[in-house]
Image (tube, grey):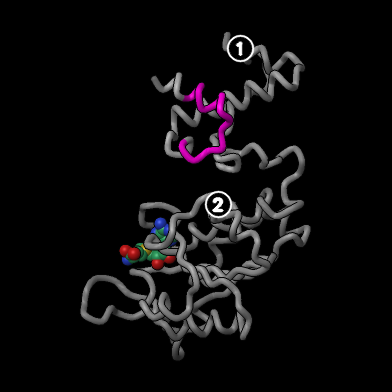
């Protein structure tokens, strides 16, 4: 997979992409991340990329020319999804990450200041994504969130010890509680079933805990989750 990022602040990406799983994925050539400095496409000798909004108002708006030039230089005539990070976009979640990982190339466009000229939304980008109902200073942190969630799903990126299979949201449920050593910490015990060596019992306990945890924290997810008849009955009993 290849991910191109159009940004005014390419240096912001160096540390997050130089650590842990993303670095490993880049080193093993499972993903290629290419940064494009929007300033290189700026106008005139001062490489201008933003101007005051027509109609007045606070702040600056990213101009269409540099954004069109940057994206068109990357994609040429090919059909590649061009995603604008914006608080007005569709809400990012695991399902969207699973959808994005199916593409062999993505172009992410990071806004800044008051955002981008409306013609960029209308005629250049093919998708708009928000990482939550709050406003960030720029699209860079949002792009990092999207890339992290997408890249960890690429086959071969996670080792078996880091399997994403049971992760919260992958199954439609929140993940069950996890414990490691020591067996007793400050008098708090690990649930005995996890030490029993009985894999069927452990799987049953984990499934039940995932359901109960989702019920306690995110009933909205539980309504959409794929539950067996007896699991639905357990949920109904617990909720009464
Ligand atoms: C200060 S924001 C501009 C917000 C814009 N004036 C609005 O109200 O929609 C600057 C840039 O940060 C990015 N951004 C801010 N919040 C975001 C969010 N929740 N998700 C994705 N990107 C976001 C976008 O790229 C945006 O263009």
**Local crowd at mark 2 within 10 Å, few (<14), some, or many (≥20)?**
few
Quadrant in which the C terminus appears: top left
Q: Quadrant of the N terminus?
A: bottom right
Answer with the quarter of the image where residue 119 lies: bottom left
Dot 1 falls on a residue whose secondary structure is strand
Tag 1 residue: 189
Quadrant of the rendered structure where residue 237 is? Answer: top left
Image coordinates of residue 16 in percent, x first then y, are: 59, 54
Instruction: Where is residue 17? Give x, y as percent.
Output: 63, 57
Q: Secondary structure at mark 2?
A: helix
**Residue 96 in the image: above or below residue 50:** above
Q: Is residue 137 visible?
A: no
Q: Residue furthest left?
A: 56
Is the residue marked by circle 1 packed among few (<14), some (14-19), or many (20+) residues within 10 Å? few
Residue 104 as seen in the image, left or right of residue 133: right
- Farthest top residue? 187
| Residue occupied by mark 2 | 95
Asked if residue 34 is positioned above or below residue 202 in the image, the reply reads: below
Q: Residue at coordinates 59% horizontally, 60% vertically from top-left?
A: 100
């Amino acid at each position: 997979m290849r991910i191109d990022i159009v940004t005014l602040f390419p240096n912001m990406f160096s540390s997050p992409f130089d650590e842990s799983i993303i670095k490993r994925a880049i080193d093993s050539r499972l993903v290629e991340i290419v940064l494009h400095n929007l300033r290189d496409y700026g106008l005139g000798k001062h490489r201008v990329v933003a101007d005051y909004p027509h109609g007045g108002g606070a702040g600056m708006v990213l101009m269409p020319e540099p954004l069109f030039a940057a994206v068109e230089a990357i994609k040429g005539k090919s059909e590649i999804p061009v995603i604008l990070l914006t608080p007005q976009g569709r809400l990012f979640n695991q399902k969207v990450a699973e959808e994005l990982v199916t593409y062999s190339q993505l172009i992410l466009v990071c806004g800044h200041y008051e955002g981008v000229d409306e013609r960029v939304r209308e005629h250049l980008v093919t998708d708009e994504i928000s990482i939550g109902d709050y406003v960030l200073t720029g699209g860079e942190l949002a792009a990092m969130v999207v890339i992290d969630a997408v890249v960890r799903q690429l086959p071969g990126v996670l080792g078996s010890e880091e399997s994403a299979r049971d992760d919260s949201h992958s199954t439609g449920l929140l993940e069950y509680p996890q414990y490691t050593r020591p067996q007793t910490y400050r008098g708090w015990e690990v649930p005995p079933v996890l030490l029993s060596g009985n894999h069927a019992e452990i799987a049953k306990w984990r499934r039940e805990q995932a359901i109960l945890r989702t019920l306690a924290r995110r009933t909205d997810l539980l309504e959409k989750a794929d539950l067996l008849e007896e699991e639905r009955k357990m949920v109904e009993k617990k909720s009464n």
